[in-house]
Amino acid sequence: MNESTFPGTQHLSSTTEPMSPTPETAPATPPVTPTPAPAPTRAVTPPSNYAEMPRPTAKLTAEDMHPVNEPNGAMGKIGPTGRPLPDLPAILPPTRRGPAQVIAMCNQKGGVGKTTTTINLGAAIAETGRKVLLIDFDPQGSASIGLGVQPHDLELSVYNLLMQRDITPAEVIRPTRVENLDLLPANIDLSAAEVQLVQEVAREYTLQRVLEPIIPHYDVILIDCAPSLGLLTVNALTASNGIVVPLECEFFALRGLAMLTDTIGKVQDRLNPKLEIVGILGTMFDGRTTHAREVLDRVVQAFDERVFHTVIRRTVKFPETTVVGEPITTYAPSSSAATQYRDLAKEVLARCPVG
């Protein structure tokens, strides 16, 4: 059928040009824009040089959240800090005893995991055969409680060692249930030392003086500092070679970090020039929350390699260990929390070689 068979079209000849439609008879047809072809995709391979890695971001998946040392090695995984996980070597047994590396666990904000880290890091290092002394330098006595010692039952504590010249370290130090781990306990009496030391000559060096005789007998001495930047904390920093800063992955803990680094700088300039930051440890980390990932990201951007690759995640087992009075490495030795502190011990010993 052709056009001439429709009614009203018989008068059109084959040579007649068809009439163009007018706006009244037909709508204008909009031009069709061709759809661009999709860009070819290519595989993205991570650069081999760490310096070329992008800055850490908060967009990490659950697959990226791995301990520092897996049974088969780090295998190039990106850890929770946004950096490639190191494949740390196994810790060899010690070849000698002492002199001890003195490390202060310091953060003026409370509730960031100082005591938990001191106990469990000390136990993890003791597992390697190294002799560890844990000093409870907090009047609350939390580290003592965490190792099964009741502060109110103490006849002698670190307070007596600081304030009484006739007391020797051997009279105060006591063994714990963990092999190679000793404790210098504390109780509420230590709060009086903050006031009494003000009148002492060279008051900032009091703890250093009492530790000098025992440094040759230990490989690592860990000091659990009070949550303040008072005279007791200054004593701990003056007596230490290094500092580990436990930092809760939370905004208020991040704000206090600037004040702490300022205090550390003053101690380095005026009292202890050999003091160094061993590392900043992210604690109470929950990778499911954007806030925790963003806080950890900010810390890494500010302090870079000073931030430990190991991150301590939240777990219900830490409160349980306080009740039973032992570290996580003996209470739940196969748990992920115990693995994290063993990984931290490897990092600390890699940065502060002992034995």
Image (cartoon, helix red, strand yellow):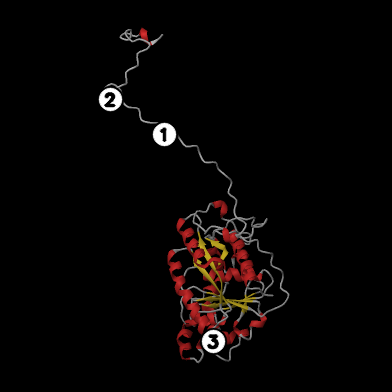
Q: Earlier in the sequence, mark 1 or mark 3?
A: 1
**x and y, in percent, of residue 349 in the image:** 64, 70
Within-10-Å neighbours for mark 2: few <14, some 14–19, many 20+: few
* Camera-nearest label, 3 or 2: 2
Type of amino acid at the residue the image marks with label 2: Pro
Q: Classify 268 as above or below 123.
A: below
- Distance from the alpha carbon under mark 1 to that under mark 2: 23 Å
Instruction: State which quadrant residue 255 falls in.
Output: bottom left
Q: Residue at x 73, y 75 (%)?
A: 95
Residue that mark 2 sits on: 23
Residue 99 seen by the camera: yes
Q: Quadrant of the N terminus?
A: top left
- Distance from the alpha carbon under mark 1 to that under mark 3: 80 Å
Q: Residue at x 66, y 57 (%)?
A: 73
Q: Earlier in the sequence, mark 3 or mark 2?
A: 2
Type of amino acid at the residue the image marks with label 3: Tyr
Q: Earlier in the sequence, mark 1 or mark 2?
A: 2
User: Count the marks: how many?
Assistant: 3
Residue that mark 1 sits on: 33
